[in-house]
Amino acid sequence: MVSMAIENQIHDGFSVIFTQNMVVKASSSASSPPHVLTLSNLDLLSGRFPVTYFYVYRKPPAESFASVLNGLTSSLADTLTHYYPFAGRIVTNAKTSEPEIICDNHGALVVEAHANIPLDELDYYNLDQFLQGKLVSINHEYPLHVQVTNYTCGGISITFTFDHALGDASSFGRFLLAWSEIAQGKTISCIPDHRRNLVARSPPTYDPSLDDAFISCSIEEIANIPTKHTLLKLLYHIDASSVDRLQRLSCVDGVKRTKIEAFSAYIWKVMVRTIEESETHCKMGWLVDGRTRMCRDDPNYSMANYIGNVLSVVFGEASVEDLKRGSLSDVARIVHGAIAKATNEAHFLDLIDWVESHRPGLMLSRIVLGRGGPALVLSSGRRFPVAEMNFGFGPPVLGTVCTTVEKIGVGYMNQRPSARGDGSWVVSAILWPELADALESDPERIFQPMSRTHLGL
């Protein structure tokens, strides 16, 4: 572990003092001598966005902040032994013009910080107010960046920022769970698979519809996505009773709809009220994990522990009139049909081949890149570890995804279970103001701005 002195950053009102940076290396290198990990075709579809998870913990009952920080860095070093690419460097190969991971135990960056307020004074609703530059800072030299912040009440927040080239939510969830298991002296429950062996067929072939859905792009185009609206980063609490009610309304005539399908239908019906009158159609998208969809015919191979990106984004489109007039069950049926297009192995094999046919470079969904009209993407994190994220000083009161991305071509929501364990949800959202107003003023009162009361602080 290497320490580096850094400057303090003070902000108006709520301020954070950064006291030290520590470079944490794997306690033993499983990748010695250093080698290059070539990204898979689906990794190239990730867009290289930074992905951040934000967890909040009450004051540890017995440990000091110094001992908590020491325990976190020590257990991180052991975790990086198993997840050695996370301690590497991501560089662009001069010959292929594509990023690759140099597994050289460069290390992960851990930042120690101190806030000038107690946890119950944080604005948990407006994420823009405290994330960027305060609780989340980005250093592109390190694909994994962790900030541990101590508050005047003795409480702690931890933000974990990953480069999307390292993996997707399933990969990051497995990494964080392994870290918490090691911190508690347990044996890790997942032995990671770092092979990145999702290769194209020969010759590559794909459904022509993928040409309309995805596009080759540069890192500069991703950084400069055109946006028509000011985007707000907000956090919401959703009661379990609200989710159950939406599901009941979506299930008619003996047809079963999932909670996510019902929730999506509700959002879509509210969203369509906020788009410009000139728009005749509206889109909604969903991130789909391909791990359980691929290799079903091979009983000797499972992708459950695969570390990398195995994601697709699929969109549904409907007329504004149908969305406004249709019942919740009608819209849920459209949602179900759209998601079903990607919940099969053929879709992911086609997607791998599509990327192969458009290399070199990065690729992204056209709509996420801002080329497809009004849309919102929903990601479900119902299996992502939240309450399980105990590093030896107690479970969190909040665990959610957040982002420092400044430009994105669509609205975005991420749903995951609340740390309360009562069936309620936490929803992190990037919304245009009109949509935020519509959701919060809707008589159903599904979306409740997150508060310290929801967290029991």
Image (cartoon, helix red, strand yellow):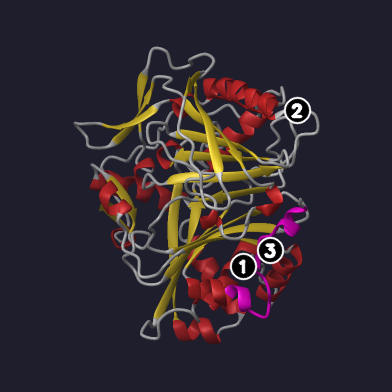
* Residue 364: % across, % down: 34, 53
The residue where tag 1 is placed is 263
The residue where tag 3 is placed is 238
**Magenta residues, as a range?**
439-456
Closer to us: 165 or 329: 165
Cα–Cα gap, marks 3 and 1: 10 Å
> Residue at the spot x=62%, y=69% of the render?
262
Cα–Cα gap, marks 2 and 3: 33 Å
Closer to us: 278 or 42: 278
- Please report whichever mark, 3 or 1, sits nearer to the chain's N-terminal start: 3
Quadrant position of residue 245: bottom right
Residue type for callout 2: Glu
In the image as oriented, which residue stretches furthest toward the right? 61
- Please report whichever mark, 1 or 2, sits nearer to the chain's N-terminal start: 2
Left or right: where does residue 390 sit relative to residue 437? right
Q: Mark 3 falls on what kind of element? A: strand
Which is closer to the viewer, label 2 or label 3?
2
Counting other residues with Cα less than 10 Å from the Cα at mark 3, is it few (<14), some (14-19), or many (20 or more)? Answer: many
The residue where tag 2 is placed is 63
> Residue at the spot x=58%, y=78% of the render?
330
* In contact (CB < 8 Å): disc 3 and disc 1: yes
Closer to us: 337 or 318: 318
